[in-house]
Amino acid sequence: MRQLFCFVLLSWISFASLLPPAFAAAADYHEQLVLRPLPLSALLASFNFRSNTSLSEFEAHNFRFFPRSLGQILQHAGTQELHLRFSLGRWDSEAWGARPWGGAREGGTGVELWAWLQAATDEEADHKWLTLTNALSGLFCASLNFIDGTRTTRPVMSFQPEGDHLNTTAADTHLLYGVLPHEVVCTENLTPFLKLLPCKGKAGIATLLDGHKLFDASWQSMAIDVKPVCPVGGECVLQIELTIDMVLDIDRSKRPRDNPIPRPPPGHELPCNTSKPYHSHDTCFPTDHQANQDWTLSQIFGRTMKGTCPLTDPTVPPVCLQVPDSRSVYHSDGVLEKKNLDRVSRCFEIKPDVDFEIVLPAPEDESAILVKPETPLLYAERSFTGHGQERGGVQTILRNPSPDTEVEFIYMESLPWFMRIYLHTMSARIQGHTTKDKSLIKEVYYRPAVDRARGTQLEVRMRVPPASTVFLTYDFEKSILRYTEYPPDANRGFDVAAAVITILSPAAYNLRTTSLLCSLPTPDFSMPYNVIIFTSTAIALAFGGMFNILVRRFVAADEGPEVGLAVLKKRIKERVGVLVQKFKGKGQKAEDKMVEVGRMVENPGVGEQT
Amino acid sequence: MPPNITTTLNTARARTYVFRLPLFTRVVIIAIVGFWIAGLQSVVDVREWGALIPDEMGITTLYRMNTFPFIHLNVLHAVMNIFALTPLMERFEGEYGTLNCLALFFGPLTTIPALLYVGVEKFVFGGNVAVMGASMWVFLLLAVEAIKTYKVNPRFVIGTYSIPTWTTPIGLLFAMAVLVPSSSFLGHAAGLVVGYGAGLGYVKFLAPPEKILRWIEGKLNLLGRLPHYVSIDQKTYGRFGVLPSANGASAASPGVSLGLVGSTQRLASALALRRDPRILKIPPYLSLLCILVGAVWLFLLPLNEYSRRTYISENALLPGQVHTYFGGSDQNVFRAYKKEVNELVGKGNVEINDKLESIVKALGLKTARQNFTYSAAGRTFAGENLYAILQAPRGDATEAIVLVAAWENVRHEVNRNGVPLVLTLARYFKRWSLWSKDIIILLSPDSIAGPQAWVDAYHDAHDSSKVASLPIKSGALQGAIAIDYVQEQRFKSVHIVYDGVNGQLPNLDLINSVVNIAGGQMGMGVALQEMWHHNDKYPDRLRTMLRGMLKQGLGLASGPHSSFIPYHVDAVTLQPFGEGWQDEMAMGRVVEGTFRSLNNLLEHLHQSFFFYLLMHRERFVSIGTYLPSAMLVAANFTIMAIFLWMKSGQPDAPAESTDKTPTPTVERDLFLPLAVVTLSGSLSAIPLYIFNHVPESALTPLFLLFLIINTLLPIAISLLSTHLFPSSPPTLQQYHLIKSFSLLLLGMFLSSLATLNFSLAMLIGMLSAPLSFVGPSSSLVSRIAGFALLNFTSPPAVLLASAAVWGLNVGDVLREAAVAWHVTGTYSAVVVWCVWWPAWLAGCVCVLGRTEDKGGKVKEA
Amino acid sequence: MNGGKVTVGRTAALYAGAAVLRLAIFTLLPDLPDLLTGRVEVSTPVTSFKRLQEGLFLYNHNVSPYDGGVYHQAPLFLPLFSLLPNALSYPIFTYLLYIAIDLLSAGALWKTADSGEAGSSALFTSPRRQRRWNGFVIAAIFLFNPFTVATCLGRSTSVFTTCAILHAIAKAVSGAPFGAMVALAFASYLSMYPLLLLPPLLLLCYDRQRTERVKKPVISFAATHVPVVFGVLGLLFGMSYLITGSWEFLPSTYGVQLTLSDLTPNVGLWWYFFIEMFDSFRSFFLAVFWLHLSCYVGGLSVRIRRQPLVVLTLLLGIFAIFKPYPSISDTSLFLAMVPLYRHVFPLMRYSFVIAAVIMYASFLGPAFYYLWIYAGSGNANFFYAITLVWGLGQSLLVCDLMFAVLRDEWELERPEMAGKEIKQI
């Protein structure tokens, strides 16, 4: 019976088919760590913590294993279902195969949040959304409060509620989706995360979660999912599931903490291909990409696991390892190892108070190092085309590896408003064909951006035929912003959130593309005063010129009052005269002074005729 | 009678002018020259002796007040002042007579400014700056002239704002103070003040009484004895009363010019200004001055006063701040990879890529390939790029840095050390977890076409019929380093190649960081522009700068990095050279250090300069300092164009000038000029197309053929234009207009080009400078002479000459140009054929223009 | 050179030549039109053809084009262009439409020129009026002006406005005030600012009324004709409402011009000013700029009352400089009207300087824009400086033309001053 149970559980873990509610209702809290070695000396570790509380108790503010801090927020914001993701790095699907949980427990780089809120109107929903984001940003030390109107969309096709909501409240439930691609996930987000756990970080698999290791991982994703689950006949429970997936680089993790610098190893330690003719003590063709399949838990996580969490459901083995049964694995005593029927995974049952440690020695035969990763249903790669800061294009390459089955999925982009996309340029073509293929795109939901108010939301339901590659492309224009709207590092560019791909058939599977960096044209930030002055001057020149011509009247050059130096001269003359008058009482001298001044004034005349 | 406006300064006119210089002016010039020669010897410091030094002033040293104008700092100073002084002084003397000049210039006009200066400098500012040079006189005389002009036409109008003409010297004063270093603002100002005084006649009373002068003159019979002596009496008849002069009558005295101006119905005072014969005589000299100053300017740049020390302005780079660990057992790996690479030498491109790809894949990088095929000058350049992406751990494919190693460098030597070094570095970089940007390794078969194809495809700017798209991509490229490491023995220093296609340059910060890391941290030398030895002195700096400008002007790709720069990706190529003790690992550490710096970047490089001329690894001039020289050269064409336009509007015979047409200017017949200019413009498409599309073998013969046609074409056109309308052969005015339009276009294109490719604009400007001075003339000799001159400076001739100078074959040069045009999109050819050549053609047509009928009028007018 | 005798043959030849030239470029250089469509000098946010296509696409797919930040053009374009076959698959029809529009404008211009209104209006007859070009030359100058050709190739929708304005003027000089008003209403509907031309146009109509009609005072004339404009405008708005089904096209079409929410660079003076403007002063300066733009109407109409056509011309010039979203098509409209004043050219003082400045600007502009946007080696100030120069060059032209015209009027009072030097006090 238990074997069977384990098998079911494991199959659920590795294939992400949702758990039958019956089991969910049974256990109030359990946690599990699954370790899966991956090619190129990588190791996938996925932690999963799940706890339930019945809705009635929840309403009565009686949170048992449900974290109170989060619960109150949810109640206050009228949230029915919540999904929060912190992700970093990229999943290398060529090498590592399909994503854990079928991609259901991960987000794009940065922070992603979507939730079903209960509200009568859109305005109320927005208001509650605002409350929710602000509260969560406080709780998780992330700048979720920057998810404003321009970063929020209301997806139509991409997301479906995972929980089963009673009494069809679809009318007054609103789905809102916000994403912060530029948010850098780091240790300060992990600490509040651990605080949500019943055993905090003190016991159980959570003791392996160490900030340094977690954020040195090649790819890592922290997920929080809150949803109501109603077993048939049973009472509805509110279920919170916390998931942490990380891909660790084994040889990087095995480096001692005190000396992390990858200095070149001494020559004799270098793994060489000795078959090369030129191989000698100082010439070595390296073969190290094969190595590093031997590791221990403490090497990887820097510590051993401290027993199990007493609150956890004892029926669920806390640690499972996915390597072929043929590979020998040593573990510390007081631990019961169980091989599963699928012959590629084994679980360990641990006594509450023993330190748990496993050791994988270097494998004997190359073949049995690790489980062959299953190929994903779809490969997606998104990149910008074109150059310059005026306009550009987005090109998504979607490859369907399977030889026979066609893949149908929904491709969703939520773009910032300053990327003005031209939907009429969107086209999908199969590689090899130059002309675009109408039949690939089945349905498009498009909500254009409004400047400074709303981002673009684009959802495309499309298909990729078997064993073919589809190019989905569209053009956009980069708009120039007001200089106050640029961030301090304006020339870095603006992050564009990952595209979300939700596969409908043949199986439920999610994936995200990488995020992009869009560089906008920048004004000169040191110039506001100069620009205002220059432009105003130009306008003043034009206006003044016309005004002059309009209002002043024409006269011949010789008519009208004299201007310029003549006036000046006259003024000087008077000035001098007055001065002299008041200076010398004697009229006689004053007079000939005047005469002299007079002559001085005449003189130019002389100069002229000479 | 209308003034005669001499358009072209032909040598004969210049000679007579020199011979007509009056006595005192000559004396002054000779004195200045003499003092300069005297200053050459170092026994007695003439400058010390003669300069006007406030603190030195005393009873015994009063002579300084008269000597300082004759003494100059250096030859440049002296020459400039002589140029400026001569015409003014000559006019002045012509009006006041030699004796007066003598009296005034050894009396008040020199001493008063001197006293003014000393007084102010010493007692107001309390400074003690020595001044010397005749520029004080220049300003003084300018002020006098300005006042005179002011009396004739009080103001000239810009827009709707009329500016009194007497203010112009003040403007000049400030301009000088700003532009010319170490020019004494105070000294000039003093001269200016006294000048205004003199102009308004306030210092008249200081002039010696005429009676006495007349008496002296009479007694000594100076007029008889001294050659070029200007009598005092003559001034009453106006200047040049008795001087032998060809254009005597023409150079109208103010009085006459007034009458003239009045008669030719001026519209506004501005027009009056245009009418003013003196104004109309200036432009040719002005534009000549522009060219001279532009050229001189260029040669001043390497001096310390003008160039600046380089500095890192992007703080995030922190070059040389990190410790580099590349080395140790990596050397073993390097040797292995080198063995592998050596085995591949001489194999086919695909074979090489297969091997290299297997190695790179083994490192755990994602690899991909790209095919490209260019065809130019009857050849095809095909190949296959291999590139790999090292994904930044924890990074998201938003930014990337590129590390390039071409299998062959530009000289087609196999990059024996570069390729293995890049492989080893890739393996080394893979171990680090600190990369915030992806690292792309690009291994291209050649140095020009391969990288070009790759970058084009990366930015989707490629022609997909020639170049395949890239299967995998990363984020925005932030920078690129290319390694061209051919030499086998250990090297001494690194040579940085930084010229991009079409003369675009990478951000100066990148070069600075490499210099900083290689030179400062690694302690190896750094060289630029193939200056293997550089003592930071003037000649070497100049040579470096000129080499840089030449490369920039040609606009060819100089290495794998060149193709990146047009896409705003800053890139350089590093070439180890010289005999030293640095090994491959040192080179690797330089690259590592640079990559760490680039990795630190938060924003795309935008801080430092993109327009600069490097003259030493730590010296440069920025655009603000060097652009004026090119702009001046371009401006000279515009000046001439405007001037010719005005002239073409001049009534060129007395009859027309007095008739009662309400128009101030005669009608301009624009049809023929526009036709000729358009024709020459449209013809230019032919050579451009031919030289870019014929196969290599045909290039040389075609070129020679073109050379001949090129010489005959102008003759044909001018004959055609004369014989097409025998009734009305092209008039002088039309020739002026042709020249005016073509020069206007040339100036316009060059000044726009100067902002895109400074050096090219400068080169073309200098080479086509003669165009603004040769023009139609009546004498056959001058026509032939001008035509010959133009033919020596014609585009093909210059091409031929330069090819000969560098010992190249014309065919190769043309092939390179064609390849550059097709592969890297170098537009130098367009500039040469579609900007320079049409202007040259129009110029030739003008030169060949025969204008007996009108010309005669001009002569006697 | 005043054209000589104009035969039907020459007319046809001219139009055919212009059409063939455009068609040739369209067909021989298929990339050029799209290149020009992308140039900021040619197409602005309120006239861009690419944005029109986007709006059209959304309209045809039942997404309101005005519920977004891309499409800011008049609603009636949507049904008009959705009648044409898709511009991407069958571009030829679009080309033909634009060419036809250009020819229509030329025709209107021709009428205006031949009416001789420029030389001798009802209240003023220039002593120089013999020296004029006939319609043929003026139409040719318009049709072969590079700016006009570029605008046509760029398929900017401002050509429709140009056409409407020219027709309004043509109707006015040919004494059909009603037609003029309707045409003006269309122009204002397409791009708002032509409404400012109403006063001078009214005066022009008033002066050119058929003589047999009894002359009513201007006021009553205006009272009868202004309602026409607003009636037609109201009608158009009503149709637009029916087409789009909501009034949201008003803020998104005219509101954008009023508030300059889209700061895409163009050849005008507004964009960089309002990029760098402090938020607290933005609305104030918007008001000031609009006030400045409209303040010319009254002044010119009063001062040059005797030649309303001059006022129209000068206003067009001023709009080409100070509009929120100017482009070279506005300049081409102004340059199309200027040759009507051939007779005062001799009185202009800076013709060559103006030509040089405008040519310099039109060469340096693209170069600097390239340096800023693509090469990244220059910054925004490069292009901004050139827009300043461009604006100044044009304003110099406007000033000079104004001066010449006024001087021409003045010499009628004092014939003896012809050709003398004068000054203004």
Image (cartoon, coloured by chain):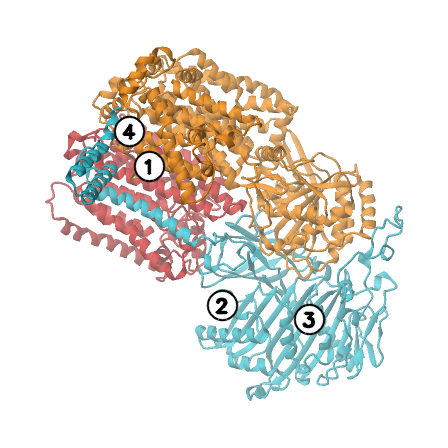
Chain colours: A cyan, B orange, C red
The amino acid on which the numbered mark 4 sits, given as a three-letter code, is: Lys
Residue that label 4 marks: B204
The amino acid on which the numbered mark 1 sits, given as a three-letter code, is: Thr
Q: Position of residue C215 (x, y in %)?
A: 11, 45
Residue at image position (25%, 45%) is A547
Q: CA distance from mark 2 to mark 4?
A: 81 Å
Residue A266 seen in the current view:
yes
Subunit under mark 2 = A
Mark 4: few/some/many CA within 10 Å (<14, 14-19, 20+): some
Nearest to the observer: residue C222 or residue C92: C222
Residue B198, by quadrant, is top left
Which label sits in the foreground, 2 or 4?
4
Residue that label 3 marks: A211
Which sits earlier in the primary sequence, circle 1 or circle 4? 1
Left-right relation of B605 to B713: right
Q: Position of residue C337 (x, y in %)?
A: 29, 38
Nearest to the observer: residue A38 or residue B342: B342
Instruction: Indicate whether B220 appears above or below C215.
Output: above
Residue that label 2 marks: A148
The label number, if any, that marks residue B167 in the structure image: 1
